Image (tube, rainbow, N blue to C red):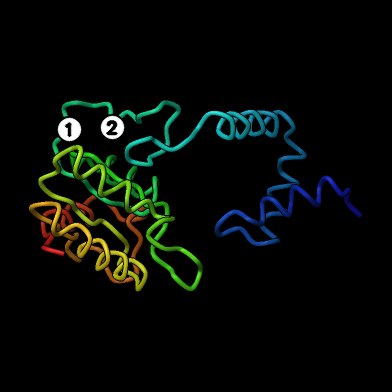
């Protein structure tokens, strides 16, 4: 029999994506056996909880009012719209884009209560206006929700920006931007098309 505190740890770990009850148990036992690591992890989680927030402009993760990307004046006036900070990181790490980003933190899913307000689309339109963006690239996953979000955004953006494009399908249908390799992302950026 284990303690209530241990079970709470297992329950919390099981809420992580891709972690089921068995994996959560394995991780919890590992952390209990390695108390120093558990302490470091606790401090890191506490710091993230206390200090990390959304950028005022693009909704990327930051500790300041503006993230490093929004603060970088050498960036082009193009905006790449992504679903998550993880997608932004994948594109940045591949070195394919030198503009700015906008992070939706999700995709349209009306049945789940996720509409344009939750995705900050008004904030995106404001960013397009303020930065005088020449192009908005929609770099969203090739899923039903991703396609619906791209269509909605294309309609909302077309009167406000010269060019709205989507990534080419170097990304297979159902693929996640976050897990795409550099070559696939490169082909997707090179072959982007009008949304």
- The residue singled out by tag 2 in the image is 69
Of residues 171 and 117, which is closer to you in this image? Answer: 117
How many labels were placed on the picture? 2
Identify the residue at horizontal 19%, vertical 26% (top origin): 73
Does the residue at mark 1 contact the one at mark 2 (Cβ under 8 Å)? Answer: yes
Of residues 184 and 59, which is closer to you in this image? Answer: 59
Of residues 46 and 120, which is closer to you in this image? Answer: 120
97 relative to 42, above or below: below
Say which element carries label 1: loop
Q: Earlier in the sequence, mark 1 or mark 2?
A: 2
Residue 138, x across and y down, in percent:
23, 57
Residue 51, x across and y down, in percent:
53, 28
Residue 142, x across and y down, in percent:
30, 67
Report crowding for label 1: few under 14, some 14 to 19, many 20 or more residues within 10 A (C-alpha).
Answer: some
Which numbered dot is residue 132?
none
Residue 77, x across and y down, in percent:
14, 38
Of residues 120 and 98, which is closer to you in this image? Answer: 120
Identify the residue at horizontal 31%, vertical 70% (top origin): 148
Please give left or right for residue 43 compared with residue 95 in the image.
right
69 relative to 5, above or below: above
Report crowding for label 2: few under 14, some 14 to 19, many 20 or more residues within 10 A (C-alpha).
Answer: some
Identify the residue at horizontal 74%, vertical 32% (top origin): 35
Q: Quadrant of the N terminus?
A: bottom right
Please give left or right for residue 103 compared with residue 24 in the image.
left
Say which element carries label 2: helix
Which numbered dot is residue 75?
1
Residue 126: name its quadrant: top left
Q: Quadrant of the C terminus?
A: bottom left
**Cα distance between the residues tagged 1 and 2:** 8 Å
Identify the residue at horizontal 71%, vertical 40% (top origin): 31
Please give left or right for residue 19 compared with residue 159 in the image.
right
Residue 57: name its quadrant: top left
């Amino acid at each position: 029999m284990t303690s209530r505190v241990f079970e709470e740890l297992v329950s919390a770990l099981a809420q992580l994506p891709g972690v089921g009850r068995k994996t959560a148990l394995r991780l919890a036992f590992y952390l209990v056996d390695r108390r120093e690591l558990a302490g470091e992890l606790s401090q890191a989680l506490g710091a993230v909880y206390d200090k990390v927030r959304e950028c005022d402009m693009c909704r990327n993760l930051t500790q300041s009012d503006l993230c490093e990307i929004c603060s970088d004046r050498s960036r082009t006036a193009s905006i790449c719209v992504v679903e998550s900070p993880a997608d932004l990181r994948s594109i940045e790490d591949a070195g394919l884009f030198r503009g700015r980003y906008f992070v939706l933190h999700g995709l349209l899913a009306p049945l789940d209560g996720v509409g344009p307000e939750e995705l900050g689309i008004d904030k995106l339109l404001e960013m397009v206006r303020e930065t005088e963006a020449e192009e908005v690239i929609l770099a969203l996953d090739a899923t039903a929700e991703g396609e619906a979000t791209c269509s909605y955004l294309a309609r909302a953006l077309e009167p406000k920006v010269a060019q709205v494009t989507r990534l080419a399908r170097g990304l297979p249908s159902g693929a996640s931007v976050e897990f795409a390799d550099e070559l696939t992302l490169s082909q997707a950026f090179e072959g982007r098309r009008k949304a």
